[in-house]
Amino acid sequence: MEKEPLCPSMQQEEKQPASRIRKAYIARLVGRCIVFVICFAMCFFAPEQFDVLEGFNFFKKFSLLHLLWAIWLIDMLFQLIPAKDHIPLGSQKHLLSRFKPIKEKINYAALKRYVVTTTKSAYKVFVIWVLFIGCIGLLYHFGVFGKTFLFMFSVAFYVCDLICVLIWCPFRLIMKNRCCTTCRIFNWDHLMMFSPFFFLGGFYSTSLLLMSVAVWIVWEFCVFLYPERFWEHSNEALRCSECTDKLCTQYCQKLRPAKKG
């Protein structure tokens, strides 16, 4: 696999201002933290709000969780349709509208090696996550906590998703990707987020879980049908020089050479 070149921003000495998308993501992280606090408070002060999780109660009474359901569904829809002004490239690089082919001839042998290597890393993450969620499922099965706190795991993952993007991502230790824009598993976020719903049942949980599976399937099909869209040596849009999202600038700043005294 060809070594990824250092991005130009690593060589700059002056800190660049945050991009519009990064600012929006910071605001979204704050919003998600507020959602978590509200849901956590409801666990103790308004537990009836979680009745919507049972069976088809989704259609029988209104809950604040309906608003969260709608937000989650819309987020996933934006991963399937072109929405350049609102969604970072890393999440939509599988779409033709975000593909910017290189002017030179693509090295398909190197592209194949890249896909094989990143896919192996991706499914290491998948196995680790399945084991982790399996442990949560066992705790739920043995009554350590109930449906409400099982739901709260997904809300916590909802917050952690943007922490991974904006602050630090543990999956980079396995994936070895330079940034979120080039991340092989960027659109696995909702599948991972809603994986605890596998144990919940009911329309609320099942509908979101199935939609996240659909997003994941589309992403994985595109990886193997259009691999050139996922590699910066075949898709110029993924290169640092073309980056407008700048979601992961903290990594570039850490790698930037220190000023000479």
Image (spheres, helix red, strand yellow):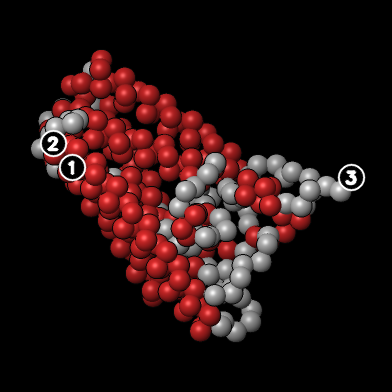
Type of amino acid at the residue the image marks with label 2? Phe
Q: How far apart, in angstroms, are the residues tagged by discs 1 and 3?
A: 57 Å
- Residue, far right: 261
Compared with 246, 93 (above or below) is: below
- Residue, far top: 45
Where residue 82 appears, as percent x and y from the top left, is 45, 58
Position of 144 with respect to 34 (left or right) is left
Dividing the picture into quadrants, the one containing residue 139 is top left
- Residue, far left: 55
Where residue 255 appears, as percent x and y from the top left, is 68, 52
Dividing the picture into quadrants, the one containing residue 202 is top left
Find residue 261 and name its label.
3
Type of amino acid at the residue the image marks with label 1? Leu
Where residue 131 appears, as percent x and y from the top left, is 27, 51
Between 76 and 241, the one nearer to me in the picture: 241
Residue 20 seen from this side: yes
Report if the CB atoms under discs 1 and 2 are less than 8 Å apart. yes
Where residue 253 appears, as percent x and y from the top left, is 69, 47
Residue at the image position 33 percent from the left and 57 percent from the top? 126
Find residue 241 and name its label.
none
Marks counted in the figure total 3
Q: Badge 3: few (under 14), some or many (20 or more) residues near its Cα, within 10 Å? A: few
Which quarter of the figure is the C terminus placed in? top right
Which quarter of the figure is the N terminus placed in? bottom right
For mark 2, what is the residue? 142
For mark 1, what is the residue? 138
Residue at the image position 46 percent from the left and 79 percent from the top? 112
Residue at the image position 45 percent from the left and 52 percent from the top? 171
Compared with 139, 247 (above or below) is: below
Secondary structure state at the residue bearing disc 3 = loop
Compared with 41, 143 (above or below) is: below
